[in-house]
Image (spheres, rainbow, N blue to C red):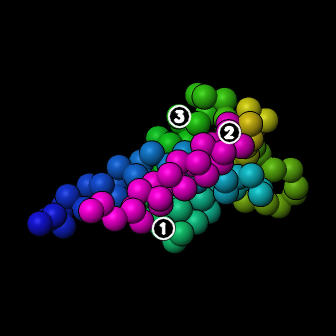
Amino acid sequence: MIRATEASDATSQLRKGVVEFAVLALLESEPMYGWQLSQHLIGRGQFIASIGTLYPVIARLKSKGWVAPHLPSGAGETVRRYYKITSSGRERLAQFRIQWDSFSRSLDDLLETKVT
């Protein structure tokens, strides 16, 4: 029998493997600031546990050149550091989508197969 902690560990590992791409997918539609990103990531599948776990992810994405800080123009706006996806981030996200599609279909096939 699988213990609850083992199932939780497996889910945690899956999230860690895809959280960078979840951030890129969110930034693909519009630049966002950290709190805004964290709310989407927590609300849409709990990709992160808290906003504190988001900033190391953003730092990795910045170091890879996939995300860049973005300061919006406009008078009177609260100064927040927004992040936007870069062209290389868009390319990497497009590659990931292809890989994910193939990977998830293969895994679905395996999960649906009944070994006799």
Foreground pick, 56 / 2: 2
Q: Residues within 10 Å of mark 1 (few under 14, many from 20)?
A: few
**Few, some or many residues within 10 Å of mark 3 (<14, 14–19, 20+):** few
**Is residue 102 rendered to the left or right of residue 80?**
left
Mark 3 and mark 2 lie on one chain; the one further toward the N terminus is: 3
Which amino acid does the dot numbered 2 rest on? Gln
**CB under 8 Å between discs 3 and 2:** no
Instruction: Report x, y in % for residue 38.
Output: 53, 60
Residue extending farthest left: 1
Q: Which residue is mark 1?
A: 45
In the image, what residue type sits under mark 1? Gly
Magenta highlight range: 92-116
Q: Are marks 2 and 1 in contact (CB under 8 Å)?
A: no
What residue would you read off at disc 3?
60
Label 3 or label 2, whichever lies nearer to me, is 2
**Numbered disc 3: secondary structure:** helix
Residue at 53%, 62% in the rendered image:
41
Q: Is 40 on the left or on the right of 73, as rendered? A: left
The residue identified by callout 2 is 95
Marks 3 and 2 sit apart, C-alpha to C-alpha, by: 18 Å
Report helix, strand or loop for mark 2.
Answer: helix
Question: Residue at image x 62%, y 62%?
Answer: 36
- In the depicted structure, whether residue 92 falls above or below residue 17: above
Q: Which marked residue is nearer to the observer: mark 2 or mark 1?
A: 2
* Residue 26 visible within the image: yes
